[in-house]
Structures are given as structure tokens and as C-alpha cells.
């Protein structure tokens, strides 16, 4: 009987020790409901003791959010407690970890802009509004060069009354509203801000899992869908349909100019308008969005080509004809020429934050972190996606981060 009681006590103690507290911390503009689904599901599946998904203030700078997180959790989260953070929540928890190491026993971040988010700079300096104006200008040229404004078919596909509303609300304004940016917060969140840089050289022994979203193309379209929690593929399909409409309208107008020759210039003018919108949708829009979020940049590359260096190609032809020795003529009129060219490069991102910021590249704080990719996940999607759920299960099973994030099943 004595040994049975000791065994029961040991089992009880082991059960208590296996439990871990988990604190789900939302990002900018989030609330208590941001992590609610995951918090509820995992609470029923895992031996979680205290399980919080509170709402924290995000409008008065990251430092104030960090203080709010600490105050609401109260005292010390506990040596084994996990902080699971999305976006700005991870930036705030990094501050807590540096200033009060041990507050959390493990930290998991999803899409956190640990080197800042350039979109914050560009919303405040007006570049984002220029992005909207440029997009609207290019997309409206074709439709507004017809006899009537935006064709009904485009309205039906877009689901909006006009292009201005579609571009403004679906792409940039949805992000502005979701972010709820204020000067204090945007200054902290700005790319390579002074706030962020003060933590770059700090390392802590706290175990860390850092997840970065790698959204598929077109990133700006998928981001807009993820921000509103609607089916990505339906939005991408609509985007592709609009692109096809622009291409078809371009081709029709270019064909009609040969049918109605007296109106050749008019149909060319219309076709050129549709062509601008089509080219923008094919690739320019994604490149410009990448620039807007700091995931696009140009690099200079040296390219070597075999080029004609004469002033008149007929001279080369005559040379060959007169000498019958093309190799001699080539040496005179052709040579290998090396030139510097500007090449656009698009960095991987979750549609809002570039990879290098999500993983705090070249900083000490993530020096001991396990970094894992979330393929096909946009910034807001990752806090509710199946891929994120699978990754958390891996962590709780001890498959990622070793035993540092283990939580037994119930």
C-alpha cells in the first residue's frame, strides 16, 4: 500500500510537471480573438495549464505593448511557460526576453518584423498612396478609353464598383486598417528603426523557434485574401480573370485598327491603354509591392555579350563579300563587350515582411533559434493555417526545438 501511494504521488507530480502555461500574443491591431482558435484547440489536446489569448495595446509603441503583456500575464510567466507570438507580438516579446530573461521558458514567433517593416515607413511617408495612384492610373486607362467607363464584366469579376475602390481597399488600405498604425508604433516598426537596432546585439539563452512565411506569387493578391480570411485561390482566380480581360481587350483593339483603318490611331490608343494595365497585372504590380514592403531591390550585374561594334552592319557584310574570310571581318567588327546592367531581385516574404526581417538576420537574439519556413503562408494566414498547426504540433511533440517546447497530449 505504501508503495502504491508513493507511485500515485509520483505520477501526480509528473503530471503536474508535464503541464505548461502558454501565452498567445497577437500582433499589431490584433485582439483577444486573434489566436482564439489555436488557443482553444490546443488547450483541448495538450496538457496546458494557464492558457491566455488576451488583447494587448498596440497603438502606443512596442515598448508599451511589452509592458502590457508583462502586466497582464503578471509577475513572471514561469520557467517553462511558452510565449507564442504573431507579428509585432514577437517584437514585444523579444524586448521582454532581453530585459527580463527567463520570463518565458520558450518563445515562438510567426512572421515577426524583427528588423522592422518597411511598409510602416511607406504608409507614413506617402509612398503607399503613390503605389495606389500608380496602380489606378494604369488599370483605368484601357477601360476609360472606351465609349463607356469600366465594363460590367470587370465590375462583376472584381466585385467592386470601380478600379479605384478595388486597388485601394483590397491591397493597401486593407493593410493600413489591419495595422491601425499610429506615429509611436510606426516609428518603432520602421525598417531598421532605432527601437529595433537596440536589440540586435543582445543574446539570451531562451529557446526560440522562429517561423517565417514564404508566400507564393502573386504575393500582394494572396496577402489581401489572407488579411480578410477569404479563400486565396478564388481571389487569385479573379485576379487572373481580370488580367485575361485586359489582354483580350488589348488584342481586340489592336485587331480592329486593321479592320477600320480610318480609326487606326484611335484603336491603337485604346489597345495601348489596355496593354499598360495588362503589363502591370502580369508582373509590375508584384514587383512594385515587393519594393513597397522592402522585399524588392535592384542589383548591378556584369553581363558579357558578343556585340557588333561598327556603325554600319553593311560594312561587315561587304567585308565578308570582299575577303571571303568572315573570321577576319568578325575580329574587326565584333568583340566581347562587358556592361553593367540593373537586375530586379525579389526577396522571399510573407507578403508583408521580408524573410530577413522575420528571422532577424545577422542579429544575436536569433543566434540560438531554430528557424523554419512556412511555405505558402501569408502574414496573417500563418496564425490560423494548417501548416502553422502542423508546425506547432511538431514543436509540442519535441520534433522542433528538441524538448524545449514539448507539451504532452492529454
Image (cartoon, helix red, strand yellow):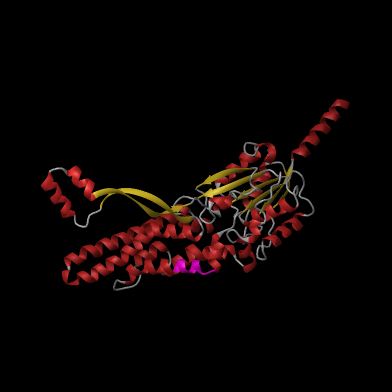
Please say whether residue 158 is one of the residues in the magenta stretch. Answer: no
Q: Where is residue 23 in the image (x, y as percent from the top left)?
A: 70, 50
145 left or right of 172? left
Q: Which residue is drawn at 31% across and 48% down?
A: 305
Q: How many labels does the image show?
A: 0
From the image, which quarter does the C terminus lie in? Answer: top right
The answer to whether residue 410 shows anywhere in this view is no
Q: Where is residue 20 in the image (x, y as percent from the top left)?
A: 73, 43
Q: Position of residue 162 (x, y in %)?
A: 41, 69
Identity of the residue furthest to the left in this view:
322
Res 3 → quadrant = top right
From the image, which quarter does the N terminus lie in? Answer: top right
Q: In the picture shown, does residue 349 fall above or below 140? A: above
Q: In the picture shown, does residue 286 fall above or below 394? A: below
Q: Position of residue 204 (x, y in %)?
A: 71, 46
Q: What stretch is highlighted in magenta?
A: 125-132
Q: In the picture shown, does residue 242 fall above or below 125? A: above
80 left or right of 302? right
Identity of the residue furthest to the bottom in this view:
147
130 left or right of 32? left
Judged by its main secondary structure, the magenta piece is helix
Identity of the residue furthest to the right in this view:
2
Q: Which of 41 and 19 is in front in this view?
A: 19
Res 379 → quadrant = bottom right
Amino acid at each position: 500500500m505504501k508503495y502504491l501511494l508513493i507511485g500515485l504521488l509520483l505520477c501526480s507530480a509528473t503530471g503536474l510537471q508535464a503541464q505548461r502555461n502558454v501565452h498567445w500574443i497577437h500582433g499589431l491591431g490584433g485582439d483577444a480573438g486573434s489566436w482564439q482558435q489555436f488557443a482553444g484547440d490546443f488547450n483541448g489536446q495538450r496538457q496546458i495549464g494557464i492558457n491566455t489569448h488576451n488583447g494587448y495595446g498596440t497603438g502606443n509603441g512596442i515598448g508599451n505593448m511589452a509592458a502590457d503583456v508583462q502586466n497582464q500575464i503578471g509577475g513572471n510567466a514561469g520557467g517553462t511557460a511558452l510565449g507564442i507570438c504573431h507579428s509585432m507580438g514577437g517584437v514585444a516579446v523579444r524586448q521582454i526576453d532581453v530585459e527580463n530573461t527567463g520570463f518565458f521558458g520558450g518563445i515562438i514567433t510567426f512572421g515577426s518584423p524583427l528588423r522592422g517593416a518597411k511598409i510602416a515607413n511607406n504608409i507614413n511617408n506617402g509612398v503607399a498612396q503613390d503605389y495606389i495612384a500608380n496602380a489606378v492610373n494604369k488599370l483605368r486607362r484601357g477601360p476609360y478609353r472606351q465609349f463607356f467607363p469600366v465594363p460590367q464584366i470587370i465590375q462583376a469579376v472584381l466585385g467592386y464598383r470601380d478600379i479605384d475602390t478595388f486597388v485601394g481597399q483590397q491591397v493597401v488600405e486593407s493593410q493600413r486598417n489591419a495595422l491601425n498604425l499610429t506615429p509611436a508604433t510606426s516609428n518603432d516598426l520602421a525598417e531598421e528603426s532605432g527601437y529595433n537596432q537596440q536589440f540586435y546585439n543582445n543574446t539570451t539563452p531562451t529557446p526560440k523557434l522562429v517561423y517565417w512565411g514564404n508566400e507564393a506569387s502573386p504575393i500582394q493578391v494572396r496577402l489581401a485574401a489572407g488579411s480578410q480570411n477569404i479563400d486565396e485561390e478564388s481571389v487569385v482566380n479573379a485576379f487572373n480573370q481580370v488580367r485575361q480581360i485586359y489582354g483580350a481587350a488589348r488584342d481586340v483593339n489592336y485587331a480592329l485598327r486593321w479592320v477600320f483603318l480610318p480609326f487606326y490611331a484611335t484603336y491603337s490608343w485604346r489597345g495601348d491603354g489596355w496593354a499598360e494595365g495588362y503589363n502591370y497585372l502580369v508582373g509590375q504590380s508584384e514587383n512594385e509591392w515587393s519594393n513597397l514592403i522592402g522585399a524588392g531591390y535592384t542589383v548591378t550585374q556584369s553581363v558579357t555579350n558578343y556585340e557588333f561594334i561598327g556603325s554600319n552592319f553593311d560594312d561587315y557584310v561587304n567585308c565578308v563579300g570582299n575577303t571571303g574570310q568572315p573570321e577576319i571581318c568578325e575580329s574587326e567588327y565584333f568583340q566581347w563587350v562587358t556592361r553593367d546592367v540593373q537586375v530586379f531581385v525579389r526577396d522571399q516574404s510573407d507578403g508583408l515582411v521580408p524573410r530577413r526581417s522575420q528571422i532577424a538576420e545577422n542579429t544575436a537574439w536569433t543566434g540560438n533559434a531554430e528557424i523554419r519556413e512556412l511555405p505558402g503562408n501569408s502574414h496573417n494566414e500563418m496564425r490560423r493555417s494548417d501548416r502553422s498547426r502542423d508546425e506547432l504540433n511538431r514543436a509540442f511533440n519535441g520534433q522542433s526545438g528538441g524538448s524545449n517546447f514539448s507539451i504532452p497530449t492529454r
